[in-house]
Amino acid sequence: MSRYKPKTRVIPLGSAAWQRLRAQVLAEEPLCRWCLARGQYVASTDVDHINNDGDDNRRENLTGMCHECHSRKTAHDMGKKVFLGCDVRGIPLDPNHHWNKPKDH
């Protein structure tokens, strides 16, 4: 099921307001969060709306990501089958992966 919401933006991506907000996020998160989870140091180049709502520009909903991870997350959120990778311990990053589900005992 797709969790992706079409992007009707309150702050258009080409606007000066978005460029300021984007610069703030990238300055605060210069390294891709997903790459860091895998033990890699890759620069953030994109800003992602974590909950996929392009109108929700609260700082806690924005994160810096490298372009590759951002593209992968967007494809995943659109319902496409993608491999999100694993953290440094080998645990899948996808919260819906069966390894990340509570165990029934």
Image (cartoon, rainbow, N blue to C red):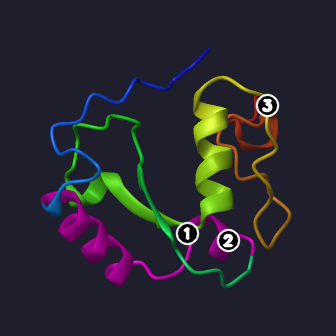
Q: Are marks 1 and 2 in contact (CB under 8 Å)?
A: yes
- How crowded pointer 2 is (Cα within 10 Å; few <14, some 14-19, many 20+) is rated as many
Measured as percent of width and height from the top left, residue 97 is found at 76, 37
**Viewer-nearest residue: 23 or 53:** 23
Residue found farthest to the front: 14
Magenta stretch secondary structure, dominant: helix
> Whole-Å distance between the Cαs marked 3 and 1?
33 Å
Residue stretch in magenta: 17-38
Q: Which mark is drawn over residue 33?
A: 1
Q: Earlier in the sequence, mark 2 or mark 3?
A: 2
Left or right: 54 in relation to 84? left
Percent across and percent down for residue 56 are: 23, 41
- Going by the numbered disc 1, the residue's amino acid type is Arg
Secondary structure at numbered mark 1: helix
**Which residue has dot 2 on it?**
35
Mark 1 and mark 2: Cα distance apart in space: 6 Å
The quarter of the displayed image where residue 43 is located? bottom right
In the rendered structure, the answer to whether residue 68 lies left or right of residue 61 reads right
Q: Which residue is mark 3?
A: 105
| In the rendered image, the vertical position of residue 27 relative to residue 87, given as above or below | below
Circle 1 residues within 10 Å: few <14, some 14–19, many ≥20:
many
- Report which quarter residue 18 is drawn in: bottom left
Please name the residue shown 74% across and 80% down the image.
39
Residue 2 position in % (x across, y down): 57, 19
Q: Which callout, 3 or 1, points at the residue further toward the start of the chain?
A: 1
